[in-house]
Amino acid sequence: MTGLNGIAIHISALLNYEFENYSITHYPKAEQNQINPESIWLSVGGVINFNPCEMNRLKDKRVIVQGILDSSNCHLNGFPAELIASAIEPYKAWAELHEYTHT
């Protein structure tokens, strides 16, 4: 992931939103191995905040997260990278908006 350090990306993943675990995890779930090696720590920049009601609604669902990847700051070295999010959307709404059909 170091080749993507500092790059703005958007990624499709499952949202984990629970105490001490704000992260996104590999999708589809059937292809996951272990939790942390497959997950990216999620934090927010100055643009958005974690709205608890919205995050709980999206918890364990497929989302699109847009942000800047930082592989130098990996939340206590428990994750391979951190994504500083600037937007989090439900996957279906994003796919419809962008007319994206890949599953």
Image (tube, grey):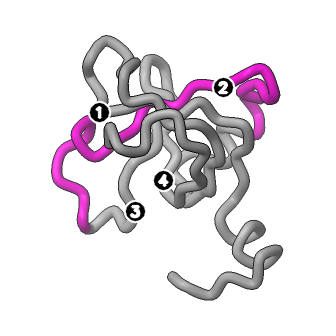
Q: Relative to 71, does residue 57 appear above or below in the rendering?
A: below
| Badge 4 element | strand
| Quarter of the figure with residue 59 | top right
The foreground one among 10 and 64 is 10
Kindly indicate whether the residue at mark 4 contacts the one at mark 3 (C-beta within 8 angstroms): yes
What stretch of residues is rendered in magenta? 31-54
Q: Residues within 10 Å of mark 3 (few under 14, many from 20)?
A: some
Q: Residue 103, how many percent across, how many down?
A: 51, 82
Marks 3 and 2: CB-CB under 8 Å? no
Task: Please say if the residues under marks 1 and 4 sit with CB atoms less than 8 Å apart.
Answer: no
Q: Would you say residue 41 sits in the magenta stretch?
A: yes
Question: Which residue shows up at 58% across the image and 36% down it?
Answer: 68
Secondary structure at badge 3 equals loop
Horizontal side, residue 45 vs residue 28: left or right: right
Q: Which residue is mark 1?
A: 80
Nearest the viewer among 59 and 2 is: 2
The CA distance from mark 1 to mark 3 is 16 Å
Is residue 102 visible to us here? yes
Residue found 24% across the figure and 66% down from its top: 31
